Amino acid sequence: MPVTTDSPAIPPISVLADQERELAEGVYDFAVESIGPHSGRMDRENVMDPDLIRKFFDLDLMGIEIPEEFGGLGANFTTSIAIIEALARVDAACAVVVDVQNTLVNNAIKRWASPAIHRKYFPQLAKQKVAAYALSEAGSGSDAFALATTATQQGDRWILNGEKLWITNGLEAELFLVFANVDKSKGYKGITAFFVESQWKGFTKGKKEDKLGIRASSTLALAFEDLEVPAENVVGNVGEGYKIAIETLNEGRIGIGAQMIGIGRAALDYVTKYVKERRQFAQPLAQFQAVQHELARMDMELECARLAVYNAARLKEAGLPFAREGAIAKLKGSEAAEMCTSKGLELLGGYGYVKDYPLEKMYRDAKIGKIYEGTSFMQLNTIAKDVLKRV
Ligand SMILES: Cc1cc2nc3c(=O)[nH]c(=O)nc-3n(C[C@H](O)[C@H](O)[C@H](O)COP(=O)(O)OP(=O)(O)OC[C@H]3O[C@@H](n4cnc5c(N)ncnc54)[C@H](O)[C@@H]3O)c2cc1C
């Protein structure tokens, strides 16, 4: 259960406008009330409560940046980011469901897909159907463009064959942004994005992963066997998929940074309350300066990470380059979350190590931040490339 504190749900940093803050605070209140009571059970049972997904749609959380004319909220990217942070403070798995739908799929469709796809799918994405982003495969993770899934043109259709792995939202999703190569001789320049409905013949959902953390978020393998995709469901131009993948992940990483600072903040809030109550040596733990310094370090790491996350979000909104800043946001966010949950767990002593207290789950949930949407080494590669270009 999240801790109720006197501090505001969303700290008053200058980059959040009143409307963005109000929306995120409203989502936080909703999450405390409606997600909090189910979070532990969903983690234990490795399952997402379908009623929660319905509520995400009802509250427009699945179409935050989809224009209002298509049933979305019509808000900006920073609002998506603040909402992901707010959700992750209560449940990191719910945050990633919303994150993938908004920052990876909806944004790719908004920017790259045809007006016909907008008209057909935006109302579904905003109000009804969960979506997923299918890039990774068993043999291609960090080296994503080595993907083996193929697409062959036959008249007005493309025929997809191959397998995907690790697909977040895979169980609940009915719509998938799938990357396949139309001409392997062209290398990454053959990669093309397709918008695929899971009910189409040749689409099979496979094994669901049994994970360390974010257990309520489904992670699935997929298989495509002669899956027919109409030509109008190509997203962007043929051969442009690598660009769509890179640029979408650059945005998505800011979302993961937000998820991580949400987890870290939840850990700091819980631990702060705990050390004020827990007594050893005839005084509250919070009286020991060593303990206070641990809290201060956690707070400082989170502040740095938050500034990095919201700075990257604002750069993206302003149409300025943000690949480096997005990588920093994710890397710093995931390091802050790991640090806060690890130190937080230690400050609870034995109670931190058991499932009756929330730090154990937060610690597990934080770990994914260093892996998905590009591992920490991949973020460092992006940052280093920018550094080397500069001088
Ligand atoms: C829970 C979960 C959800 C996911 N959701 C999705 C999703 O929705 N859609 C999707 O497409 N994918 C998804 N992924 C896949 C994820 O993005 C990949 O797992 C990730 O990119 C790493 O790829 P890999 O697992 O193949 O590891 P590898 O690429 O094999 O990497 C293994 C290790 O080698 C290191 N390494 C690799 N190359 C280099 C290098 N050049 N220099 C230095 N070190 C290197 C890595 O940093 C890592 O430490 C998900 C994964 C998980 C675990």
Image (cartoon, grey):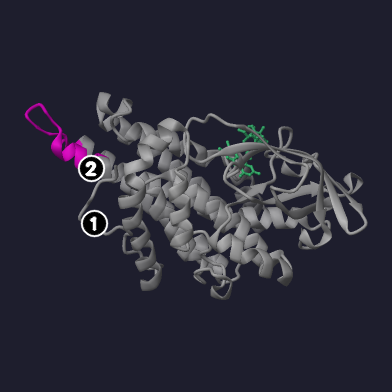
Label 1 residue SS: loop
Q: In this view, does 84 lie above or below 318?
A: above
Q: Residue 143 carries which label?
A: none
Decide which of tag 1 and tag 2 comes sooner along the chain.
1
In the shown orientation, is residue 170 left or right of residue 151?
left
How crowded pointer 1 is (Cα within 10 Å; few <14, some 14-19, many 20+) is rated as: few
Q: Residue lying furthest bottom in this view?
A: 69
In the shown orientation, is residue 381 left or right of residue 148?
left
Q: Residue lying furthest top in this view?
A: 350
How crowded pointer 2 is (Cα within 10 Å; few <14, some 14-19, many 20+) is rated as: many
Query: In this figure, which residue is indicated by the disc labeled 2?
Result: 272
For badge 1, the amino acid type reads Ser
* Position of residue 336 measured from the top left corner of the image (x, y, whole percent): 41, 44
Label 2 residue SS: helix
For badge 2, the amino acid type reads Thr
Residue in the picture at 44% in, 49% down:
51
In the shown orientation, is residue 249 left or right of residue 97?
right
Q: Is residue 1 magenta?
A: no
Q: Which mark is residue 7?
A: 1
The reply to whether discs 1 and 2 touch (Cβ–Cβ < 8 Å) is: no
The quadrant where residue 124 appears:
bottom right
Please name whichever residue, 369 or 151, is drawn nearer the observer in this view of the structure. Answer: 151
Q: Quadrant of the C terminus?
A: bottom right
* Position of residue 166 measured from the top left corner of the image (x, y, whole percent): 63, 37
* Position of residue 256 measured from the top left corner of the image (x, y, whole percent): 51, 49
Please provide the residue range marked out in magenta. Answer: 271-289
Q: Does the magenta stretch include residue 280?
A: yes
Residue in the picture at 47% in, 46% down:
50
